[in-house]
Amino acid sequence: MKRTSRDIRTANRYEVLRQIIAASPTSRQELAAATGLSLATVATLVGELLDLRMITEVGFEDSAGGRPRGLVAVNASGGALIGVDIAETYVHVELFDLGLNVLARAEEDVRPGESLPEQVVGHVAAAVGSVVTQAGIEGARVLGVGVSVPGQVDRATGTSEYAPNWDWHDVPLLELLTEHIAYPLYLDNPLRASAVAELWFGAARGSGDAVVVNLGTGVGAGLVLGGGLHRGVSNSAGEWGHTTIVLDGRLCRCGRHGCVEAYVGASGIMLTLRELSADSALLHPEDQTATIDALARGVRGRDPVALKALRDTVRYLGAGIADLVNLFNPEVVVLSSWVAAALGDPLVTEVRAAVARHALPRPMAATRIVLSPIPTDPVCLGAATFALEGALQSVGQRQAKRTAAPARSRTAPPS
Ligand SMILES: [Zn+2]
């Protein structure tokens, strides 16, 4: 797809707004320095964002010897954004102001066997309704809803093309959601959402090259390369969870054998535990969350089975992350999602040692391995930023239509 000048203008407007959200208040000069855009371009884009009431003027700062510089800040109450994290075991929904502060959140459990599209859509609709009511805001102020669903998605059509854990194929997810949700909807997957969240607000801030490793029921890697999100040609980059780590190994839910996810995803960890001790008290059959929580408590209490299960898991995880370190030479590897959050620091310590055993010394020396510092659900936050991007795009389209209208009327026959 060729990028039009309108696409570039939208991307620049988004970049300027992103900088303002990350560091309010700020001056046009600082924005030009941070984005690499000219001061004139920044001034125009800031003017547009002021017109849209997404930002406000907040006074002046002295510049050494020069004229005082006007400061702008994000207008937090200028609109609301909703982020939806659909996972295999839960639906989390958060409502944000324009500064991307959480104003309300809702959670629905997705029980095993409740994975039909209509059931999942029901959970999402209920949770979205709940956050809007809790926040007490008018529906008209909701600029958009970003929806993250695991697996391969087509952003343009709003389709979940393939979700291996639910065996979904070509589910028209946004179309189904439109029957319940009146706000503009935008679709992507948790790898992209969590990578953007880390890039804007987390451990990858200011990093040109970062890998965000999602450890949940599903496993994958969000890639930030050269300062931007890497999507690949069909929006499916980062499916590291389905790269092969053991030839002819465990059966994975994607139908292939020996995938990373089959060893380090929540159900892979449960299988490792079962293989170590079939009647372990840490095992909660059919309940991944309870099992991972019990494992985390066991590790902290130095339970030998728990420690062995963690080390066995990290043998695979460390080798897999070392591949990512060798391939992408990132500044930071962020461990994200609920399994990483539950296992916490003991996991990071083990992973660092294991990656160092497999990665080449030069890229290893340049890489930090850290837990996600984002206190809320990074996928909801990232999904909300997709809604913000979409809202700016639709503003651009409306403006383009307005400017195109007089040109068409010139060729219209006189009435
Ligand atoms: Zn697989």
Image (spheres, rainbow, N blue to C red):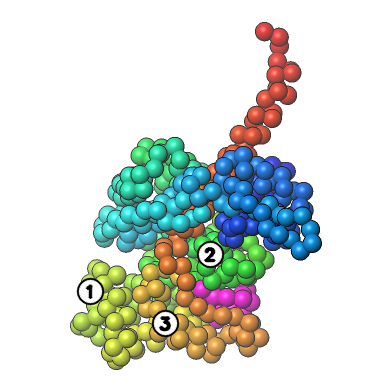
Disc 3 residue crowd, few under 14, some 14–19, many 20+, Cα 10 Å = some
Ligand 1 within 8 angstroms of badge 3 C-beta = no
Q: Position of residue 251 (x, y in %)?
A: 38, 72
Q: Residue furthest right?
A: 65
Mark 1 vs mark 3: in front = 3
**Can the viewer see residue 107?**
yes
Badge 1 amino acid: His
For the magenta stretch, what is the residue range?
320-334
Q: First in sequence: mark 3 or mark 2?
A: 2
For the point 51% across and 82% down, the residue is 319
- Residue corresponding to mark 3: 345
112 vs 1: above or below: below
Badge 2 amino acid: Phe
Q: Main secondary structure of the magenta part?
A: helix
244 vs 319: above or below: above
Q: Quadrant of the C terminus?
A: top right
- Residue corresponding to mark 1: 284
Badge 3 amino acid: Asp
Q: Position of residue 361 (x, y in %)?
A: 63, 88
For the point 40% across and 84% down, the residue is 346
329 within the magenta span: yes
In screen coordinates, is 110 left or right of 79?
left
Q: First in sequence: mark 1 or mark 2?
A: 2
Badges 1 and 3: C-beta atoms under 8 Å apart?
no
In screen coordinates, is 179 left or right of 143?
left
17 within the magenta span: no
Ligand 1 within 8 angstroms of badge 2 C-beta = no
Q: CA distance from mark 1 to mark 3?
A: 23 Å
Q: Position of residue 248 (x, y in %)?
A: 44, 77
Q: CA distance from mark 3 to mark 2?
A: 20 Å
**Can the viewer see residue 243?**
no
- Residue corresponding to mark 2: 201
